[in-house]
């Protein structure tokens, strides 16, 4: 499982990993305040990010909606295809469908999340949003749920 998580984290953009580490209270800089390189950051995350204490602290910061969404994922064994999880959370009233775009947005890896080209990109900074991608982005930001490409 640890190898699988490490492989998944490798797919994330560096800035996303920095945000996740900082949200968890982990260091993202080395001596002199210089940002860690991705390899160094991943090593620090591997050592500190998946401890019970850190996971519990992140869980305690979740809203009721986010906890319920996480529980639904855990009831599926901790892994689920995005489409079926989206459908389940929408049916349960825990999330909503993303708004439709008139024109597909050009693909950018800036978000750091390996979503499809032109798809709605979740924003962890929208705490009241019920859009499925935003709910999952907040769980990812807290280091509790990860997307595979």
Image (tube, helix red, strand yellow):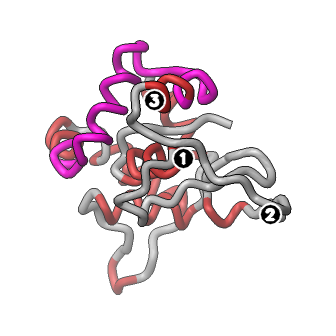
Is 39 left or right of 112, judged from the image as shown? left
Marks 3 and 1: in contact by CB < 8 Å? no
Q: Quadrant of the N terminus?
A: top left
Assign a secondary structure to mark 2. loop
Indicate the position of residue 33 as horizontal and vertical percent values.
36, 84
Residue drawn where x is 37% and y is 22% of the image: 72
The residue at which mark 3 appears reads as 89
Question: What residue is rendered at 66% in x and 66% in y?
Answer: 110
Q: Nearer the viewer, residue 55 or 108?
A: 108
Q: Measured from the top left, where is residue 23 in percent x and y?
A: 31, 62
Q: CA distance from mark 3 to mark 2?
A: 25 Å
Horizontal side of 91 relative to 84 (left or right) equals: left
Kindly report the secondary structure that dominates the magenta region of the rendered protein: helix
Q: Badges 3 and 2: C-beta atoms under 8 Å apart? A: no
Per the image, is 69 magenta?
yes
Q: Nearer the viewer, mark 3 or mark 2?
A: 3
Identify the residue under disc 1: 133
Disc 3 crowd rating (10 Å Cα; few below 14, some 14-19, many 20+) is many
Question: Is tag 1's residue or tag 2's residue first in the polypeptide sequence?
Answer: 2
- Tally the numbered discs: 3
> In the rendered image, which quarter is residue 148 located in?
top right
Q: Which residues are magenta?
A: 57-86
Quarter of the image that includes the C terminus: top right
Label 2, on which residue?
A: 105
Name the residue nearer the viewer: 118 or 34: 118
């Amino acid at each position: 499982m640890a190898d699988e998580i490490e492989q998944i984290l490798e797919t994330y953009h560096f800035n996303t990993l920095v945000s996740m580490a900082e949200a968890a209270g982990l260091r993202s800089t080395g001596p002199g305040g210089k940002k860690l390189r991705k390899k160094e950051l991943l090593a620090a995350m591997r050592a500190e990010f998946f401890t019970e204490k850190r996971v519990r602290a992140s869980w305690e910061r979740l809203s009721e909606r986010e906890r319920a969404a996480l529980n639904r994922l855990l009831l599926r064994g901790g892994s689920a295809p995005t489409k079926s999880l989206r459908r389940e959370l929408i049916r349960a009233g825990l999330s909503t469908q993303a708004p439709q775009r008139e024109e597909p947005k050009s693909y950018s890896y800036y978000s750091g999340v390996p979503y499809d080209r032109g798809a709605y990109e979740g924003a962890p900074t929208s705490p009241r949003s019920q859009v499925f991608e935003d709910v999952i982005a907040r769980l990812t930001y807290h280091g509790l749920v990860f997307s595979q490409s």
